[in-house]
Image (spheres, rainbow, N blue to C red):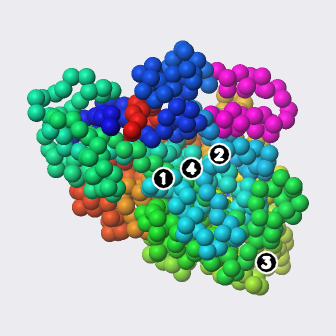
Amino acid sequence: MWNLTVASRLSRSRCFFSSVIPRPCIIQKRGADILHDPWINKDTGFPLTERNRLGLRGLLPPRVISFEQQYARFMESYRSLEKNTVSESDTSHVALAKWRILNRLHDRNETLYFRVLIDNIKDFAPIIYTPTVGLVCQNYSGLFRRPRGMYFSAKDKGEMMSMIYNWPAQKVDMIVLTDGSRILGLGDLGVHGIGIPIGKLDMYVAAAGLNPQRVVFGVLAKLILKDGMPEGLGLEAELVFHTKVEVFEMLMEDLDFDTNRIANAKAIVGISSCLYVLCVVVIFCLILPVMLDVGTNNLKLIEDPLYLGLRQPRLEGEEYLSIIDEFIEAVLTRWPKAIVQFEDFQMKWAFETLKRYRERFCMFNDDVQGTAGVALAGLLGTVRAQGRSLDDFPNQKIVVVGAGSAGLGVLSMAVQAVVRMTGNAKTAAQNFFLLDKDGLITKERKNLDPAAVPFAKDPGLIAGLRDGDSLLEVVSSMLVLEQQQQQHVKKVKPDVLLGLSGVGGVFNEEVLKALRESSSNRPAIFAMSNPTMNAECTSVEAFKHAGENIVFASGSPFENVQLGNGKVGYVNQANNMYLFPGIGLGALLSGARIITDDMLQAAAECLASYMTDQDIEKGILYPSINGIRDITAKVGASVVRAAVAEEVAEGYGKVDPEELAYMSKEETVEYVRRNMWYPNYSPLVQQK
Ligand SMILES: NC(=O)c1ccc[n+]([C@@H]2O[C@H](COP(=O)([O-])OP(=O)(O)OC[C@H]3O[C@@H](n4cnc5c(N)ncnc54)[C@H](O)[C@@H]3O)[C@@H](O)[C@H]2O)c1
Ligand SMILES: O=C(O)C[C@H](O)C(=O)O
Ligand SMILES: [Mg+2]
């Protein structure tokens, strides 16, 4: 017999629920199984009523510890770890110790874990995400404890369509997928790269409020209560009478409910009174980290006795693509509306898979497209910080170091922005200079990757510029013989130096000093490579060698720099974490069929417009990470509105595209906010 529980009163709009009372979950587990399930476990937080009802009495210490007390106890243990290790020189060891204490909580009690993460995001993002997540991937064979996510390997060819059903959730909203081939700037880490999708999805929960276990409401039955409200139904929550049966019938459809489950439930329920009861059936609508293990070319891993993946060279060509194709087919068969974020694929497959799939289903490549949006927002902020108007962006001279998936993604989006401003595609890239490991890229370069061709410079463009020139030669002055006179000529006086090379220290002292001659009074340095040791320069180096009036941003977090006399050199984190959660959330809540360039542009513009003139004046280009949920709600709303405008939105739940189209900008933000989960314990009731 179902213990009926009314979840909460319906809010005025039909598909949302006010959270007047905690939403209960109906679960199938009992006793110790509950304690071993991090999705529903509350540790000592189970109230006595639940301990009695769920067979937990005697399996826990007698004292009930509240959620708030548990929270305070965890934070105390974390802070004491911080205090006890503050003087340790081995910062990697300390970072991993912090990751372990958080991961243990993640493996034990997801509700508490995500609450402490959300409330302390500035402290914990550098641990569960960049830069520490890179260290975790490098040490994964020793750190692996509890499986998280799914693994599809080259050995599973032909099996994936059945394997996908091993995942317990009936519905999955968001998948982050990697093949481990380019993990941050750490290269090929094979199957140990799973740490990246896990960390990215933690940021989805923290920033976008995606729910790791979405409780899905649906009417269980229309019950006939003849003599009014019966006493003592054992309900945990306030009963709320609803007279609009069609509201509930509609909810059932909207939840692509398993109608057999409802039919069975109706047979079970025997209460002889009429009550439209909102009951809850837990359908885990999960976020899902996925690793495609197609081998590794990292010999150190292959020789590591504890390596957890296939000990074979990476698949290549059609063999590789056939594995991805099979996985995508399996996903779209089981979860046709799932959104797939491609993450940390090496360049050739990042572009190939983007081209192969982006028109077929809702997917994006975060390193190419998410990064581009964050960088564009920062570049537009730089134009403002340099005291220029935004329409002067086409004249901003940008030197990009790194012609990989990220660098080319950034320049492609920057060119799109210039074309939108000037209408002239022909000259759009004239002020962008691109270098790779072989130096400046000009049209003389042999075997240039097609994606880089639009940015190859005409050799004669600037006196003295040659293919393969080093970064210093590109940005520094040189003696040239002109009109029989030796004179110093600046080749490129960049307004912006942007690194996505994956190589630490590329912006050395000489290069940074050369920026003092920039044609801008406030040159910008974006040392965007991750993790920290791969940053093209540190914040201290940048302010010390390029001058105090620069704008600085990096991919991994650095502290602000004290410049003396109370002056502060503000440090920005130019990381795609500012956009991918909003891109995914907006695509989800609009029911977008695909993710278009305009949706991505809308996200970037929303991020850029977020900063006030006062922020920009200080050199602050991005909001504090403490505001990541607010910015994600606004970015998500901008993506929803762009999807509707482009008619790729198919609606979400019962909110159809027409309803989305009627929403004002503010209502769209409100719609997004209402769908963002915030962790609290839910009352648990057990399906008999
Ligand atoms: N901040 C962010 O949000 C963000 C987003 C994506 C990628 N990244 C970082 O960017 C880096 C590169 O990522 P990717 O996917 O483009 O890698 P990639 O391997 O595809 O490209 C790296 C590029 O850098 C070039 N390069 C290597 N050494 C160089 C050197 N010494 N001088 C100049 N160029 C050099 C390579 O030739 C290649 O063109 C990684 O560290 C990654 O973590 C940061
Ligand atoms: O993972 C990050 O921190 C950003 C980006 O996706 C990267 O690959 O560096
Ligand atoms: Mg990445």
Sequence order check: which comes first, mark 3 or mark 2? 2
Sequence order check: which comes first, mark 4 or mark 1? 1
Tell me which segment is drawn in magenta.
76-105
Write down the residue under mark 4: 201
Write down the residue under mark 2: 129
Distance from label 3 to label 2 (Cα)?
A: 40 Å
* Circle on res. 157: none
| Residues packed near mark 1 inside 10 Å, few (<14), some (14 to 19) or many (20 plus) | some
The picture places residue 414, in percent across and down from the top left corner, at 55, 66
| Residues packed near mark 2 inside 10 Å, few (<14), some (14 to 19) or many (20 plus) | many
Sequence order check: which comes first, mark 3 or mark 4? 4
Write down the residue under mark 3: 466
The picture places residue 466, in percent across and down from the top left corner, at 79, 78
Q: Is residue 341 left or right of residue 248?
A: right
Nearer the camera: disc 2 or disc 1: 1
Where 21 sits versus 620, above or below?
A: above
Q: Are marks 2 and 1 in contact (CB under 8 Å)?
A: no
Sequence order check: which comes first, mark 3 or mark 1? 1
Give the camera-side residue of 489 and 61: 61
Sequence order check: which comes first, mark 2 or mark 1? 2
**For the residue marked with disc 1, what is the amino acid?**
Ala
Distance from label 4 to label 1 (Cα)?
A: 16 Å
Principal secondary structure, stretch drawn in magenta: helix
What's the residue at 59%, 36% (across, down)? 36
Residue 95 in magenta stretch: yes
Distance from label 3 to label 4 (Cα)?
A: 44 Å
